[in-house]
Image (cartoon, grey):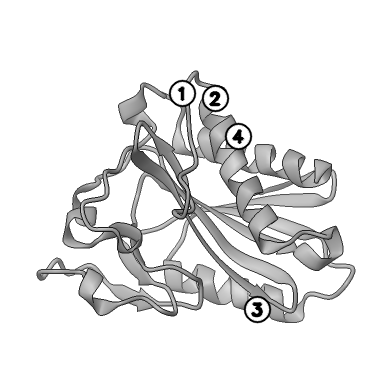
Amino acid sequence: MAEVIDRVRIVRHGRVEYAAELEAMREFTARRDAHTVDELWLAEHAPVYTLGLGADAAHGPRGASGIPVLRCERGGQITYHGPGQVLLYTLVDLSRRGLKVNGFVRLLEQAAIDTLAAHGVLGERRSGAPGVYVAGAKIAALGLRITRGRAFHGMAFNVDMDLAPFAAIDPCGEAGLALTQARELGIGESIDALGLRLARTLAGLLDDA
């Protein structure tokens, strides 16, 4: 299921395996050309830990949880994905839009901040720690890969999930990092509705950039 907003196609994939979605992102990015429409993919995954290119094994996972651990080419340290967390994958040609990586990161953060604000929740940035926080607790994590000026990977936004698996890692490489999610903040919107709001918000910000 897809919709087009301005120059961005939003595609809802539903619940898919992380490895399959990763391979699909790689293939899309490899075959796209100067005329390929940018896409935002919405997905939800079965439990999985993912490690960025430079992730330090000292940050976990610790213990025998049985949750798979996969390394990928995004930036950043280890994180966890699971049911109840929306993944917004950003297949965006930054060069064509005249965007620098730092500017794109700020747009991603702003999309999460605006999505929270629509529910009366104050989301904030934190210097030196990309992502979005509410009262010091992280609700949205970012991890990107840029190749030939084109981005993929994106943002994980906690909606209504089991946060316990984060206890076995130092999320984003930060020991003791507090985490939160939309449900705990009184936001009752479903994962599908909140994900679509997030993607539409980012599409609008991209069009204005």
How far apart are the alpha carbons under marks 4 and 2? 12 Å
Q: Can residue 43 be seen in this view?
A: yes
Q: How many labels does the image show?
A: 4
Q: What residue type is labelled 4?
A: Arg
Front: mark 3 or 1: 1
How far apart are the alpha carbons under marks 2 and 1? 5 Å
Earlier in the chain: of badge 4 and badge 2, it is: 2
* Residue found farthest to the right: 35
Q: In this rendering, would 108 be left or right of 180? A: right
Residue position marked by numbered label 4 in the rendering: 197
Q: Nearer the viewer, residue 66 or 166?
A: 166
Q: Quadrant of residue 169?
A: bottom left
Q: In which quarter of the image is residue 135?
A: top left
Q: Which amino acid does label 2 sit on?
A: Ala
Front: mark 4 or 1: 1
Mark carried by residue 27: 3
Residue position marked by numbered label 2 in the rendering: 117
Expressed as whole percent of the image width and height from the top left, the position of residue 9 reads 75, 52
Residue position marked by numbered label 1 in the rendering: 121
Earlier in the chain: of badge 3 and badge 2, it is: 3
Earlier in the chain: of badge 4 and badge 1, it is: 1
Residue shown at the point (33%, 54%) measured from the top left: 82
Q: In this rendering, would 180 be left or right of 147? A: left
> Quick check: 181 above or below 22?
above
> Quick check: 10 above or below 75?
above
How far apart are the alpha carbons under marks 4 and 1? 15 Å
Secondary structure under badge 2?
A: helix
How far apart are the alpha carbons under marks 3 and 4? 26 Å
Secondary structure under badge 1?
A: loop
Callouts 2 and 1 close, C-beta under 8 Å: yes
